[in-house]
Image: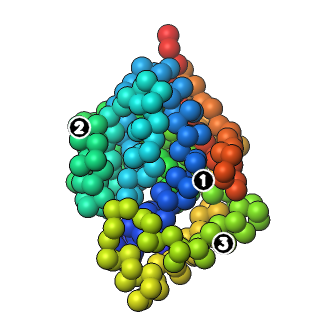
Amino acid sequence: MGDHRWCPQSVRAIVTDYLQFGVKKWKMDAAMVSLLRQALEHTGVNQVIDLCSGSGGPWLDMLRGLESKGFPVKVCLTDKYPNAQAFTYARDVFGGRFDFCSEPIEAAHVPEGLVGFRTIFSAFHHFRSADARAILQDAVNCQQGIAIFEITQRTPWAMFNFFLTSLLLPFCVPFFRPFRWSRLVWTYLVPVAPAVILFDSIVSCLRTYSAGELRELAMGTGAKGYIWKAGEIKAPAAPVPITYLLGYPGRD
């Protein structure tokens, strides 16, 4: 629901802010940093093109995590529906280490000028298998690495947990940063945001690809010389594992 064109930008921002808050609260960013750092070191790339960025994804904390491990990167945020306000905030916080594209960017058709290791956080499930494979194929065709991370899973346990956490939104909104009046309006005055997040949480779980399905999509690209890794990693504080897919050209 939150990814449809008719959904107001301010409501869509609350959905992505909620995801960011959960990732940080459950310390999922640290687990993802570990995997992503290995892929970036293998490819020798320190420029990241983040696709389907929403409100910036977990990058504000992940950037600090990578820097603390001695691997600084520069990140360019992109989205089909760019959230200029959130992107500008990220750039103001980190200066030259963050940039963003103000034009709409399709994940399966990244412009040639945007070169770097591609990342998608908690958004790959929005794409049907043909479109999902096209995203991977575009990365392969451009000889760019790509990392997919999903915090939802297609299991009854995951759906139960995300159902419960979505009900906690009214208690979490005051802690979202930066502060925005629109969050209060859509959460308390006109409670649209809780309904959208509840719906999106359940549907996202039902749509999420398993590690095996991600591996199958990757194999469908026919990429030669590519290294693909798919699996699950557990963040100690998180209720469900993170599902991931990493792909990048192998070294000669």
Residue 163 image label: 3
Q: CA distance from mark 3 to mark 1?
A: 16 Å
- Label 1 amino acid? Trp
Relative height, residue 114 to residue 37 (above, below): below
Q: Which residue type carries mark 3?
A: Phe
Q: Residue at x 38, y 53 (%)?
A: 56
Tell me where residue 216 appears, x and y as whole percent: 65, 41
Pointer 3 or 2: first along the chain: 2
Mark 3 vs mark 1, foreground winner is 1
- The dot on residue 81 is none
Which tag, 3 or 1, sits closer to the chain's start? 1
The residue located at (53%, 75%) in the rendering is: 171
Q: Is residue 173 left or right of residue 112?
A: right
**Label 1: few (<14), some or many (≥20) within 10 Å?**
some
Please tell me whether residue 106 is drawn above or below residue 190 in the rendered image. above
Q: Secondary structure at mark 1?
A: loop
- 10 Å crowding of disc 2: few (<14), some (14-19), many (20+): few
Q: Which residue is mark 1?
A: 26
The residue nearer to you, when weighing 125 against 25, is: 25
Q: Percent from the top left, x then y, of residue 138? A: 42, 39
Callout in the foreground (1, 2): 1
Asked which secondary structure carries label 2, the reply is helix
Mark found first going from the N terminus, 1 or 2: 1
Q: Amino acid at mark 2?
A: Gly
